[in-house]
Image: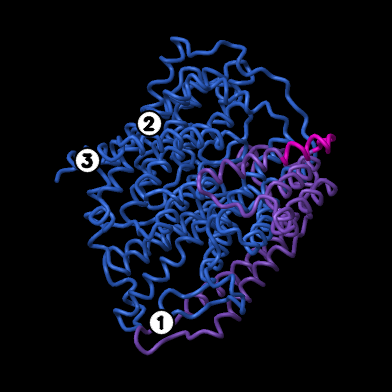
Amino acid sequence: MSTLDLLLHGFGVAFQPINLLMAFIGSLLGTAIGVLPGIGPALTIALLMPVTTSLEPASAFIMFAGILYGAMYGGSTTSILLNTPGESGSMMTALEGNQMARRGRGAAALATAAIGSFVAGTIGTLALSFVAPAVSELAFIFGPEDYFALMVLSFTTISVVLGNSPLRGAIAVAVGLGLGVIGIDAQTGQSRLTFGSLDLLDGIPFTIVLVSLFAVGEIIYVASRGPERSSGMNPLSGGIWMTKEDWKRSWKPWLRGTALGFPIGVLPAGGSEIPTFLSYAVEKRLSKHPEEFGSGAIEGVAGPEAANNAAAAGILVPLLTLGLPTSATSAILLSAFQGYGLQPGPLLFVNNAELVWGLIASLYIGNFMLIVLNLPLAGMWVRLLMIPRPQLYAGIVIFALVGVWGLSTSWFDLLLMFTMGLLGYAMRLYDFPAAPVLIGLILGPMAEQQLRRALAISQGDPTALVSTPISATLLGLALCIVVLPPLLRYLARRPAGDDRYAASRPTH
Amino acid sequence: MSAGVSPRPWWVPGGVIAFGGVMLYGATQLGQSDAHSGVGPGLFVTIIGIALVVLGVALGVQVARGVAFTSPEGEDAYGEVDDEDRTHRGPLLLAIASLAAPLVLMQAAGFPVTAAVVFAGVARAFGSRRPVVDILTGAVLGAVAWFFFNWLGVNLGPFLPLLSER
């Protein structure tokens, strides 16, 4: 069957009434939870994970698609109105969007973000529909050593890209890898690092780590900063819709943001940080009003927001075709797949075609539902943010408790949530990025499996790891990422006055 | 420099190295290689343990040089709070205590009661001064969450274990 037939079939799945309902509930719940400050898409999916356990896999993933888009939209709402991005991808949106809100142009910022997300999400999903099957064909030629090299590459890029310090990023990845080996070894059945605890045999649940690091740790941190002075602004004073001028200034950034976001998202180490940063830089350079940047330029909202959503679609390409998560959001989606006994990868397109294409089709539907739902409801979401801060954060803790206690009503899970929450607080205090922990946790066991498979085939000969052109190239790239930046910095510092590297860097 | 963070947090690299040490100790109890596949369950653990120790030492060097552990301006992933604010010990301890409450309460008292206590504690840590209203809000929120998620098929334990046992 051609891609188009498969996609139409997927729409058949997604348009079943129960699945349409799931997409609707997902978008609504996703927006409602995602709009809470500090809660990004990954955390929203984790918190709502227990809700989907009683559903069929296809319906559950369709609901996830709704939650994902809903949470992204909710996240940009909070970024714009409260300047509290829940994930790194909406940091750039917060920068200009919050300035617009402070000037009473919050509604225009929300609208350009929503429409930009819709445009980027639709184009991105369209690209996903055609790129993913091709990549999954390509993925069949990947041997275990190639997979292992790919994962090493993503560990190194994640260390460098996420967060402010490569060293702290690498430590976060290593901590995640360490947490990932705890439990029963899948290949030999031996228990590893459980130190006699029966509760640890099943390993450390991904959802709990995510909820604890992102929500619990964050709440302890914010509480420890003391009371906040409030800003009595009305973000909606300057009219509720985009002006003609706004449209004129928005449509090109939407398209440019999409063009940057999707391809970078597809790369096995893309994530959504780089495209949003790049899009912001590009718009600032191309704008006719560069002086407005920093004080509420609409291009600075339209571009990065489109880039963020296009990257979110792009990230699904390595996730679905290679089983490779490159963001906290795709890591939680991967753990959801594993929860249903499904392993994303090239075989998924063959064995579970109905589910994959239903999911892709529901991305179109979720995207559409969101714009229909949220343009009129924007006022209601804004009101949700008027809840006083103490009660808002206390409510978030209750959601976190539902997410953790609802998993299996286990006391040990509560203990894990508490200790991981303290870890999250310490990481927040010393500026360690949390997402690499999650990616290490979920990708570690997969990397180990590929490593052992590759070495088993070669009967323990480590040169097998660089024996194919693909694996050698990928490992070479990984090495460059670790070695090159410090080397360049060293070279740039050595000959006095020679600042070629420093000068050439900001212009991507 | 953030005033809330001690300038030489030696315990951070210490913790990383200690975690690496636990990994290496755990690895000694596992086979590093095996006759059939060449690789045993301990090899990967050893690699991670070594990586953690090396990275921890590198972090220790940074600490010794006095590298500040704060994000450059404008790149804070959350943007919520100025990092210049110092740590407020009272709210911090109250928040931690409230989040530990479920460990004691959840099994004995059930979800709604736990939710009431946690809600009131966290709200107070954030500066709320209306404990009675907060406890009631938390209890109502907990009960509503219990019924709503129960309806969605999520098991949150017995509603009020204290009542059902009597």
Give the quadrant of the C terminus of chain B: bottom right
Provide the residue designation for mark 3. Answer: A9
* Residue nearest the observer in this picture, A452 or A406: A406
Provide the residue designation for mark 1. Answer: B39
Point out which mark residue A120 bears. Answer: 2
Q: Amino acid at mark 2?
A: Ala
- Nearer-N-terminus badge (3/2): 3
Q: Amino acid at mark 1?
A: Val
Q: Is residue A499 visible?
A: no
For the record, the magenta segment spans B127-139
Quadrant in the rendering for residue A102: top right
Q: Position of residue B76 (x, y in %)?
A: 63, 41
* Residue nearest the observer in this picture, A285 or A132: A132
Q: Which chain wears blue? A: A
| C-alpha gap between disc 3 and disc 2 | 23 Å
Q: Residue at x 71, y 61 (%)?
A: B63
Quadrant in the rendering for residue A313: top left
Q: Position of A423 compared to A206: left or right?
A: right
Characterize the local packing of mark 3: few (<14), some (14-19) or many (20 or more) Cα atoms within 10 angstroms: some
